[in-house]
């Protein structure tokens, strides 16, 4: 069975932490854990809160091509969880209304002033290709280039 973007979104909602990889100025790859807080939509977008002054923001401004990787926990029967690799383009969002739309109370651990936290920024990753491995199932999905406006 081939998975759809909706299937992948549903899988990602159950995997909190993944790795965001960006390209550094010297051409090497930098990866760091990020929490998506289940904030993934059926069109292939993933949203992350971060601080504007972080190194990843500098790297995204220089080259918006990024990669995300996720691994689900094994099942109770020992079957490995799904592995998901996403290639996409990152954009930076500084709009408080957008912050509020994606805010979850659990984020206060990192951003104690909520959407009013100084230097708060969001990274929106729009997937261009999603590859997955789920036991015997392997596949790739090419995400649409454009999203209809909400």
Image (cartoon, rainbow, N blue to C red):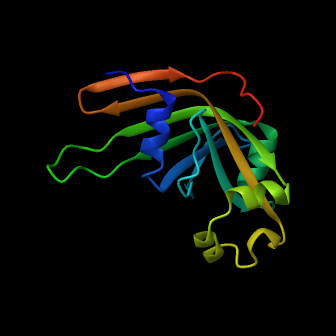
Question: Along the line of sight, which residue is nearer the eye, 106 or 80?
Answer: 106
Nearer-the-camera pick, 71 or 75: 75
**Above or below, comparing residue 36 to residue 91 in the picture:** below
- The image shows a total of numbered marks equal to 0
Q: Position of residue 144 (x, y in %)?
A: 64, 21
Residue 4: x %, y % from top left: 46, 26
At horizontal 34% and vertical 31% (from top left) the residue drawn is: 133
Q: Please determine whether, in this image, residue 107 is positioned above or below residue 123.
A: below
Q: Classify residue 83 as left or right of residue 22.
A: left
Q: What quarter of the picture does the C terminus occupy?
A: top right
Res 49 quadrant in image: bottom right
Q: Residue furthest front?
A: 150
Which residue is found at the position 24% from the left and 33% from the top? 135
Whole-percent x, y for residue 120 in the image: 79, 64
The image shows residue 82, relative to residue 18, as above or below, that is above
Q: Is residue 93 left or right of residue 36?
A: right
For the N terminus, give its image quadrant. Answer: top left
Residue at left 58%, top 31%? Answer: 87
| Residue 131 on image: x %, y % | 45, 28
Q: Residue at x 75, y 61 (%)?
A: 100
Residue lying furthest left in this view? 77
């Amino acid at each position: 069975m081939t998975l759809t973007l909706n299937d992948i979104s549903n899988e990602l909602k159950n995997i909190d932490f993944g790795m965001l990889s960006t390209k550094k100025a010297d051409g090497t790859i930098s990866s760091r854990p990020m929490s998506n807080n289940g904030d993934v939509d059926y069109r292939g977008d993933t949203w992350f809160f971060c601080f504007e002054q972080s190194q990843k923001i500098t790297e995204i401004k220089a080259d918006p091509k990024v990669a995300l990787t996720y691994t689900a926990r094994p099942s109770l029967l020992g079957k490995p969880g799904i592995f998901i690799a996403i290639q996409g383009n990152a954009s930076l969002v500084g709009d408080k209304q957008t912050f509020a739309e994606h805010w979850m109370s659990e984020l206060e651990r990192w951003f104690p002033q909520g959407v009013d936290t100084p230097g708060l920024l969001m990274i929106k990753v729009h997937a261009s290709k999603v590859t997955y491995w789920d036991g015997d199932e392997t596949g790739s999905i090419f995400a649409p280039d454009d999203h209809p406006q909400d």
